[in-house]
Amino acid sequence: MTATLPVTVLSAAAATAVDYGIDRSAVLTDIVCFHYGRPELMRHLPQQLLFESQPAATSDTDDAIGPHAKVRLPLPIAQLVDRDHQRLGIQRSTYLADIICRHMGFPHLVRELDTKSEEVLPLAM
């Protein structure tokens, strides 16, 4: 699978990968596993990293979309991603990118997930 991430987020993921001595794909994969509540499938990143705040980016290129970035998900997570992006009517690469943006501290770069989630979530009674 791939994610169409903003250049700013790609750079942040690459920096995190260098800090932990792993490749960018492993960083992105662990973030998606964490998002789905499956920390036991995270193989490289400490969960604490995902709770640390990232500085918000403010350059003019914040929302420029970079090349597709590989995300090598374990099968159980890949099945959940396929289910959810189809249910929400979002392209898979954008759906993954939105998850990653949110968890890396760039919620202002989420493109579709927030608006689609609001459309399909029932009101709490």
Image: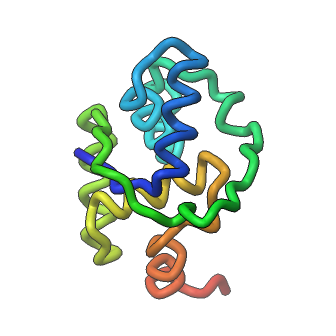
Residue 68 spot, x, y in % from top left: 28, 49
- Residue at the far top: name it: 21
Q: Depth check: give the residue in front, 63 or 28.
A: 63
Q: Position of residue 75 (x, y in %)?
A: 24, 36
Q: At 47% across and 60% down in the image, what residue appears?
A: 98
Q: Quadrant of residue 20?
A: top right
Residue 12: x and y in percent read 57, 39
Tell me: 16 left or right of 105.
Answer: left
Quarter of the rendering occupied by the N terminus? top left
Q: Who's the residue at 72% across and 54% down the image? A: 56
Residue at 51% over, 12% down: 21
Q: Is residue 105 left or right of residue 82?
A: right
Q: Is residue 8 above or below residue 62?
A: above
Tell me if 125 is positioned left or right of 40 in this view. right
Residue shown at the point (43%, 37%) measured from the top left: 28
Q: Assign the C terminus to one quadrant of the image.
A: bottom right
Q: Quadrant of residue 112?
A: bottom left
Q: Nearer the viewer, residue 13 or 79?
A: 13
> Residue lying farthest front?
60
